Image: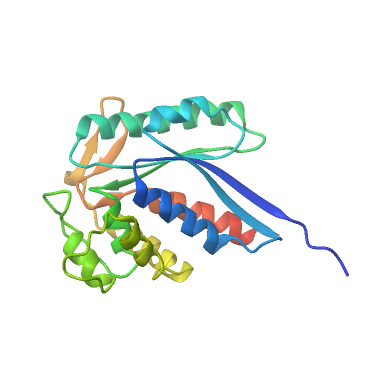
Amino acid sequence: MEKRKRYKKTVFCVVEGQQEELYLKHLANLLTDFPTKVVKFNIVKGNADKLRGNGIEYDSACVFDHDFDDALFSKNLETCIELDRKFSRKSRENGHRVHHAFSNVCFDLWLLLHKRDFKSPINTTDGYVKEIRKAFDLPDDADIKSKKTIEEILGQITLDDVYDAISRAESIKESKLGRDLHRTSKGAEYYDNPDMSIHIFMKELISEVIESK
C-alpha cells in the first residue's frame, strides 16, 4: 500500500489580541488531520512591523482591525502590501506571501459572519457585541473578549461555518460602491465598514490545505 505523503503548512501571524490568537489556533485544529496533514500558526502579538523580522521562509499574515484609527490602520495595511511586494520578488520560486487580514471595524465582525449576514455600518467598536451574543446564544451580559467566552464561541464554529463566513464576506465586498472607497497616502485601498480582507487570506489558505495531497 502506498504511503500517504505528509503535508505541513506553517504561517507566521501577527495578531492584535486574544480573540485572533485563539481563533487561529482553533482554525489550525479544524484543518489538521494528524499525522498526514498538519497546520500551524506561529503567533506573535503586535502590529505589521513585526513582520519585518520574519524573513521569507514561509507565508506570513497580519490580522488587524480598523478600530476607527485611520492612521494606524493605514500603516498596517501599507506595511503588509510593501512587504508582500518585496518578498514576492525575492521568493518567486517558492511563492511565499505576506497577507493583510483586516476587519473593519473589528474582529467581532468576522466572528459574527460565521453565523449570519451583517451588512450594516456601526459607529462604535462594541457595535457587534449584542449581535454576537444572539448569534452564539450567549447570556446578555457575556464578555465576548474573555477567554472563556471566546472559547465558547469557537466551540460553535465548524469548518463549514468558516466557509459561510468567507461567502458572506465576499457578498459584503460585492455590495460596496465607489463612494465607499478610501485610499491611504501610499495608494492602498479599503472601504467604509463593514469591510475586510481576512476572508481572502482564509480562502487562499484553506484552498491550499484542502487541495494538498
Residue at point 34%, 34% (across, down) = 77
Which one is in front, 111 or 186?
111
Quarter occupied by residue 186: top left
Residue at point 39%, 32% (across, down) = 48
Indicate the position of residue 152 as horizontal and vertical percent values: 35, 66
Residue 70, above or below 53: below
Indicate the position of residue 161 as horizontal and vertical percent values: 41, 69
Side (left or right) of 8 relative to 111 = right
Side (left or right) of 189 relative to 98 = left
Residue 104, above or below 80: below
Quarter of the picture containing the C terminus is bottom right
Which one is in front, 85 or 153?
153
Indicate the position of residue 144 as horizontal and vertical percent values: 26, 59
Residue 10, above or below 57: below
Q: How is the image coloured?
A: rainbow
Residue at point 41%, 68% (across, down) = 155
Q: How many marks?
A: 0
Indicate the position of residue 46 as horizontal and vertical percent values: 37, 34
Side (left or right) of 101 relative to 189 = right
Q: Residue furthest left?
A: 123
Quarter of the picture containing the N terminus is bottom right
Quarter occupied by residue 211: bottom right
Which one is in front, 193 or 171?
193
Q: Residue furthest right?
A: 1
Q: Residue furthest bottom?
A: 137
